[in-house]
Amino acid sequence: MNKAVILAGGQGKRMKAEMPKPLFKVLGEPMLEWVISACEEAQIEDICVVKGYKGEMIDEYLGGRCKSVLQAERLGTGHAVMQAMDFLKEDTEGNTLVLCGDAPFIDPETIKESLIVHKHGGNAVTVITAELDEPKGYGRIIRTKTGISGIVEQKDATEEQRAIREVNSGAYWFRTADLIDMLGRLTNDNAQNEYYLTDTVGIAVADGKGAGAYKSANANIIKGANDRKDLLELNNYARMAVIEKHLINGVEFVCTDGVIIERGVEIGANTQILPGTILRRGTKIGTGCIIGPYSVAENCIIGNNVVFNTAQAYDSVIEDNVNVGPYVHIRPDSTVKAGAKVGDFVELKNSTIGEKTAIAHLAYIGDSDIGKKVNIGAGAVTVNFDGVAKSRCVIGDYSFVGSNSSLIAPLKLGKGVYTAAGTTVTRDVPDYALAIDRGELKVNEGYTLRKLKKNTK
Ligand code: UD1
Ligand code: CA
């Protein structure tokens, strides 16, 4: 069976953070996640991550999803793969893919196509390469008339070799049995006194076992991040690549400033994404919507023809023809049904808002189930928390909750209930009733003049 070893021992000192480098995020996901998901999309499920610096953080992220081994000392890429020896020996029949956990743009097509080349060539090792205009720092691919003969690291290379533009991506396919054999024969006899995984190429050629190179048309597979500036570049690249996919699908962007769309987000044709919009994983948006400006949606299902203006929503559902915003916060587990309006300065939490219900402004609705065609006035608040427990409010269809009503949960308002403005509703109200709690209004005529006279004596 085919499997993968992902090298994730790096620290990333120049990031100035105490975190393993592969956990730094590109478009909201750790670089390691990009690499693992590329493997999974290429149907490689048996994965071992070689961790090093702060390995426990890698394990915590993986949560048992992949195997992991620790490289206690950083003695080179060959040494790192040696740490996975037990994993390699579990099954020596197939091939092993070795990848860098901090090169996020390796893609499933490259993985699959290079495997075909690897198998066809009957190779012990197939290096995935790319041509770079600036190859400095990378291992150079040495070719002869008969094929690839070795990889020379920057620090070990001659002037002539340094002029070569084809470089090692750091990703390889190995025949597993040959990898096990070759790892045992690596030495650290080089400029960096490291066990170079790249030396396997020379060994395979010398053994007559076959070494090949698969040159990827996508040079981005090489891109990694050594510092924050590189990381920003990776983010910018990924950001525009995702936006380009949506453009092809018919999504409209007039200006992409501040627009960040994570991978896996779905957006229907003729939806417009305005500046400053951040769409996080798990979000699905229908057609004909206007999303933004300055909005965030995370793990939300948004229907068709929705206006979502300067709003934030998390783990919620917003159905067709809903109008949200500006300045709305929709917290997890909320559903806003078709045709509803959630206007400025409204917060929803764990609530259902019925069809064509209007919460036009300045309200807090938490732990509530509101029916259809309800009107919630400005300043209305569901009082769902008594300091100890949360309770629910149920508001029946066609009800009218007056401005500044406080609905003290647990509470049930029936159908067609009116609450008078300023009413504090403390018990259930039956269908078609009015709840009014109001002291008699006193108007004390001439009060101000009397007060002024007294104070100016
Ligand atoms: C390596 C390759 C080089 C290639 C480049 C692509 C070798 C000797 N050289 O160079 O040909 O062009 O990658 O980026 O392999 N790692 C460990 N433990 C170690 C050393 C490295 O886990 O002891 C991990 C790193 O965290 C990283 C990957 O292996 O994910 C590559 O290591 P890095 O130091 O970046 O390799 P280079 O020397 O730059
Ligand atoms: Ca590197």
Image (cartoon, rainbow, N blue to C red):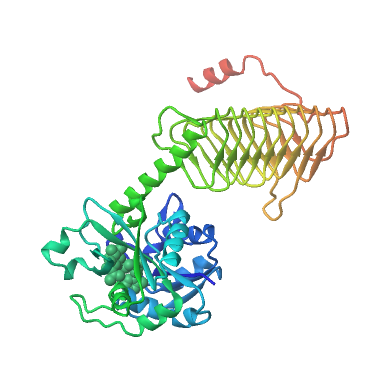
Quarter that holds the N terminus: bottom right
Q: Is residue 359 left or right of residue 163?
A: right
Residue 50 falls in image quadrant:
bottom left
Q: Is residue 13 visible?
A: no
Q: Is residue 297 left or right of residue 177?
A: right
Residue 378 position in % (x across, y down)? 64, 28
The relative height of residue 347 versus residue 386 in the rendered view (above or below) is above
Q: Is residue 141 left or right of residue 91?
A: left
Residue 434 position in % (x across, y down)? 83, 27
Q: Is residue 453 visible?
A: yes
Which is nearer the eye, 99 or 285? 99
Q: Is residue 21 left or right of residue 409?
A: left
Which is nearer the eye, 367 or 300? 300
Which residue is farthest front?
146
Which is nearer the eye, 192 or 274? 192
Which residue is farthest left?
159
Which residue is painted at 17% across and 69% down in the image? 155
Residue 409 position in % (x across, y down)? 75, 44
